[in-house]
Image (cartoon, helix red, strand yellow):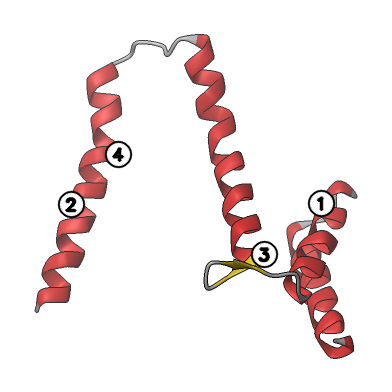
Amino acid sequence: MTATVVLIGLAAGTYGLKAAAPLLLSGRALPPVVARLADLLPAALLAALALVSTVTRDGATVVDARLVGLAAAACALVARAPFIVVVIVAAAATALARSLM
């Protein structure tokens, strides 16, 4: 019961926050600097999350097979490979690195 209440509360809060911006702005354009920042911020946050998740364990910095997979994924992205290929390359590189370590 408690988990259900918390889940419903979080869903309502998320919906409210997402609905607030269009309701408050109501057709006004964002300043160019803010619009550019809004375009770039999600990619930067996702990259930071991926890096932190890859090189930390229990608050300590580690270098292991996950970093090899991230590097392989980055190379596949630079080569403009399709997303499924990027995932397969990263998984294969991580598996190979784990088998060699």
Observer-side mark, 3 or 2, equals: 3
Position in image of residue 87 (x %, y %): 74, 67
- Whichever of labels 1 and 2 marks the residue nearer the N terminus, that label is 2
Question: Which of 52 and 50 lies nearest the eye of the viewer?
Answer: 52
**Residue at which label 2 appears:** 12
**Is label 4 or label 3 in front?**
3
Q: Residue at x 29, y 27 (%)?
A: 21
Labels 4 and 1: the sequence-earlier one: 4
Residue indicated by mark 1: 77
**The quadrant where residue 36 appears:** top right
User: Which comes before the other along the chain, label 3 or label 2?
Assistant: 2
**Which mark is drawn over residue 18?**
4
Going by the numbered disc 1, the residue's amino acid type is Leu
Name the kind of residue labelled 3 in the image.
Val
Please state, as top left, top right, bottom left or bottom right, where the N terminus lies in the image: bottom left
| Real-space CA distance between mark 4 and mark 1, rounded to the nearest whole angstrom | 30 Å
Residue 34, percent from left and from top: 48, 18
